Image (cartoon, helix red, strand yellow):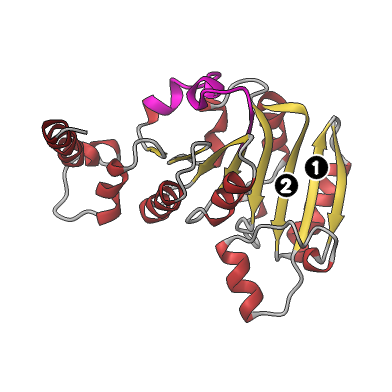
Amino acid sequence: MKKDEIKEESNEIERKKGEVWKYFFERPKKNYNKYMYEMVEYPEYLIYDNEEVKKNKGKWNEFFGNNNGIYLEIGCGSGNFTVGNAEKFKDRNYIALELRFKRLVLGARKSEKRNLKNILFIRKRGETILDFIGKDEISGIYINFPDPWEGEERKRIITKELFEKLDIILKNGGKLYFKTDHQKYYEDVLELVSELDGYEMCYRTDDLHNTEKAAENIKTEFEQMFLSKHNMNIKYVEIIKK
């Protein structure tokens, strides 16, 4: 890249940094999270503009430039799990959802460092997936260690309403993969699936790290920390859409 092109690109990044607050706040503030500005530096790996996200609905394979299966992670943290998957399975595309600026930037950094071409981080809530994911676009969805919302279970991400959304975006034969350290959440998901039409529990264990799947399991940041500090089994299920 020529010097004038580098300068022009640098100027464009600085311009975007000056305007990025407008995507998240109604009026300017004195101080901002520094990672909010850094999101602008990873246009190949991170989208924070809601309109840009929505315009790709039903066209995500075009975005990735291939017809490979698309896998979605809701609540990706700083990206260890999805980055690990994207690095391991180059014939799949990965979209990771997260809200916190720092976590999004860390995930994008890891992806850029590994020169991954099959991964994208999006600043969106899992509840909004129908806004930007089209019919039958997703081959698999990962939900790892979501908040169990003890006493406020109606706020959980895995509910009957989630499966109603999966009816639309998940391909037949696609799977929901769920990991948790919370026994009651695990049991409640098992019960929920048993009551659903169109879905079937195809794998379940209340001790993932003592199964045949342990070797292929990619740990999340929370999982690594949890296993190093606590002696509690990780629960894991795979739910297939029939």
Q: Which residue is mark 2?
A: 177
Residue 234, image x, y percentages:
74, 66
Q: Name the residue nearer the viewer: 56 or 5.
A: 5
* Left or right of residue 164: residue 124: left
Name the image quarter holding residue 123.
top left
* Left or right of residue 32: residue 84: right
Marks 2 and 1: in contact by CB < 8 Å? yes
State whether residue 33 appears in this view.
Answer: no
> Which residue is most to the front?
2
Label 1: which secondary element: strand
Mark toward the start of the polypeptide (1 vs 2) = 2
Residue 62 falls inside the magenta stretch: yes
Q: Residue at x 73, y 26 (%)?
A: 171
Residue 21, image x, y percentages:
23, 42
Residue 199, image x, y percentages:
84, 35
* Left or right of residue 36: residue 91: right
Q: Residue at x 68, y 22 (%)?
A: 136
Q: Which residue is mark 1?
A: 239
Q: Name the residue nearer the viewer: 201 or 139.
A: 139
Q: Residue at x 51, y 27 (%)?
A: 64
**Residue type pointed to by label 2:** Tyr
Q: Which residues are magenta?
A: 52-71
